[in-house]
Image (spheres, grey):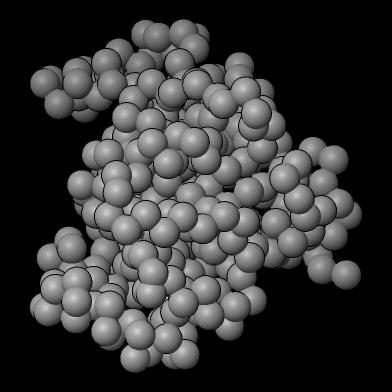
Amino acid sequence: MPDRDADPLIVAISSRTLFDMEESHSLFEREGIDAYAAFQRAREDDVLRPGIAFPLVRKLLALNRDAPADAPRVEVILISRNSADSGLRIFNSIAHHGLSIKRAAFSNGAPPFPYIRPFGADLFLSANAQDVSAALEAGIAAATLLPAVPNAKLAPHLPADQLRIAFDGDAVIFDDEGERVSREGGLAAFAEHERNHAGEPLSGGPFRGFLDALHRLQAAFPVGQDAPIRTALVTARSVPAHERVIRTLREWDIRLDEALFLGGRAKGPFLEAFGADIFFDDSENNIASARGHVAAGHVPHGVANR
């Protein structure tokens, strides 16, 4: 039986994505760290409103409730550029909202990403693009979430507490081989390349490790539409480029519950139909499409971001 405490799923998250802190962040940008710290101390008993990643965090932590005995635990760690002093308001808000977050790193303005790996994080979410890029370069799955009030809309046919995560394929789950071929030779060259290599598994991309950890957690729960976790691949690929993707996931022994091969259609409406709590993509254009419908994390990796 797996040791659920020895093999947890760990997500590191910044305070600006967990809570709505845009008022104080704007003050920091205008007047500096001292004004920001004074603002937070004066309001440390004022509860912060949920931020863009709050619903995701709530659902992640809820997986620990009534989980099978052999299920890996889920842990969320706060990684913040605040000082511990100005961060007291953040922890007061965490307690108010009933979030079981016990570990944190406050870097007092310094880049906090060096602490992500010692915590063993499988995923890092931040509003700071530089921290995200540094984490990716260190081999940690990471995405930039632009702060916003979370979209509370939920399709009536979806279970309210089900965690739904959607991924782009190339340069996120897989490497950017396909995108490089497409940019160099066009869509026809890409289609031919994929047909010729359909039997060869794709190499893993920056989110391969996180997908593995999520799959281990998912596998501990019953399969079906009412399972507490549901995943989807949402890709611009179309037939015949689908075959290599399917064979790769089969080779990896990874289960994705749904797969949408959109052939270049805008992803936002499909993600809303899926009910994604978060979507990861390397393309800023796709993120712009998705953000009007769901929380979307930009993965600044691969040829599209060079």
Viewer can see residue 120: no
Residue at the image position 72 percent from the left and 45 percent from the top: 225
88 up-or-down from 129: above or below: above
Quarter occupied by the C terminus: bottom left
Q: Position of residue 40 (x, y in %)?
A: 35, 17
Which one is nearer the viewer's eye here, 5 or 249?
A: 249
Q: Quadrant of residue 98?
A: top right
Q: Is residue 186 left or right of residue 105?
A: left
Q: Is residue 137 left or right of residue 252?
A: left
Q: Position of residue 37 (x, y in %)?
A: 30, 21
Locate the N terminus and report the quarter of the image it occupies.
bottom right
Q: Which residue is found at the position 74% from the left and 61% from the top?
A: 219
Q: Position of residue 301 (x, y in %)?
A: 26, 64
Of 267 and 171, nearer the camera is: 267
Residue at screen point 63% across, 65% down: 255
Q: Quadrant of residue 205?
A: bottom left
In the image, residue 22 above or below residue 172: above
| Residue 126 x, y percent position in the rendering | 35, 43
Q: Would you place residue 112 above or below residue 197 in this image?
A: above
Residue toward you, 72 or 231: 231
